[in-house]
Image (cartoon, grey):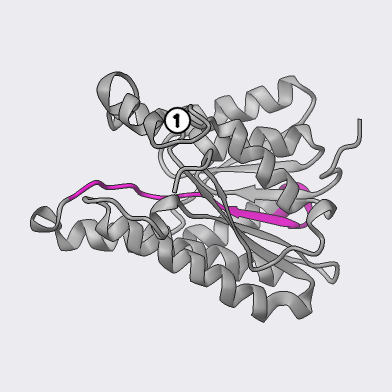
């Protein structure tokens, strides 16, 4: 079996659970050494690392709040200390708040912008600084709501639309450095978060499935396969793109 990411080093933010954890495991199983970033959930991050190591992969867990420059500096310093280089960054860390306009507070607005947008930019900035002459890959995780927002997603959708444009700008800025930048925009995906927010089970899940032409809820592995493709040489001529992975959901 060809390991598409053999000897690559990947930093994946927000990788303690859900889509981030799925990508971390898929990268490790494709030959990459993985830095599993988490903000608060140490036990889940360590579990992801354990699962990778049990299958002969290489991974470490590093705590860092990506909205804080000092934490981002430490995250990448620990990655370099452990694995000597950075080839891939997946900006997955994010906050998802469903709040109608009348209930939206400045604290919610700032929290979403700080993590979803500023965190993406800070991590990209540091990764680019550390990527070598052979370049690398940055993959930003957006959402279907960046182009098809729903009620209650005002600030979340705004930050994800911003991320779509961050990708386009950085792809043009960084092409000369051999750094490719792309976006993955997942549809509704079954994760710990989607369960905690009440999207899974019952009538609400049925309504969501009805919107998906392929007739099911996505799984982290569905997103991870595309993330492996984008980080591999199979996507060597792909940059500045937004790939929606949603089972046809608009």
Q: Main secondary structure of the magenta part?
A: loop
* Residue 24 image point, x, y percent: 64, 38
Task: Judge whether residue 76 can be spotted in this image.
Answer: yes
* Residue closer to the observer: 162 or 35: 162
Q: Which residues are magenta?
A: 80-99
Number of residue marks: 1
- The residue at 37%/63% (across/down) is 159
**Where, quadrant-wise, is the N terminus in this rendering?**
top right
Q: Which residue is under mark 1?
A: 191
Mark 1 neighbour class, 10 Å CA radius: few under 14, some 14 to 19, many 20 or more = many
- Residue 158 versus residue 10 in the image, above or below: below
The residue located at (79%, 72%) in the rendering is: 178
**Membership of 101 in magenta stretch:** no
Q: Is residue 86 magenta?
A: yes
Q: Residue at 48% across / 58% down in the picture?
A: 71
Element type where label 1 sits in the image = loop
Q: Nearer the viewer, residue 43 or 221?
A: 221
Rendered image quadrant of residue 199: top left
**Which residue sits furthest left?**
102
- Would you say 42 lies left or right of 56 here? left
């Amino acid at each position: 079996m060809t390991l598409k990411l053999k000897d690559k080093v990947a930093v994946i933010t927000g990788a303690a659970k859900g889509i981030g954890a799925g990508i971390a495991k898929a990268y490790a199983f494709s030959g990459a050494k993985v830095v599993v970033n988490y903000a608060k959930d140490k036990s889940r991050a360590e579990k992801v690392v354990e699962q990778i190591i049990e299958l002969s992969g290489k991974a470490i867990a590093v705590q860092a709040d990506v909205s804080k420059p000092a934490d981002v500096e430490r995250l990448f310093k620990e990655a370099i200390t452990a694995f000597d280089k950075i080839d891939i960054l997946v900006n997955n860390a994010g906050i998802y708040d469903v709040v109608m306009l009348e209930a939206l507070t400045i604290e919610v607005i700032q929290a979403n912008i700080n993590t979803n947008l500023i965190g993406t930019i800070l991590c990209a900035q540091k990764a680019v600084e550390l990527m070598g002459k052979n370049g690398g890959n940055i993959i930003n995780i957006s959402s279907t709501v960046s182009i098809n927002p729903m009620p209650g997603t005002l600030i979340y959708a705004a930050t994800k639309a911003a991320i779509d444009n961050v990708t386009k700008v950085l792809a043009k800025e960084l092409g000369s450095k051999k750094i490719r930048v792309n976006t993955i925009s997942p549809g509704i995906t079954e994760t710990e978060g989607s369960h905690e927010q009440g999207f899974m089970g019952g009538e609400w899940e049925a309504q969501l499935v009805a919107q998906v032409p392929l007739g099911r809820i996505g799984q982290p592995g569905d997103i991870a396969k595309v993330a492996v493709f984008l980080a591999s040489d199979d996507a060597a001529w792909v940059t500045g793109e937004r790939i929606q992975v949603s089972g046809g959901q608009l």
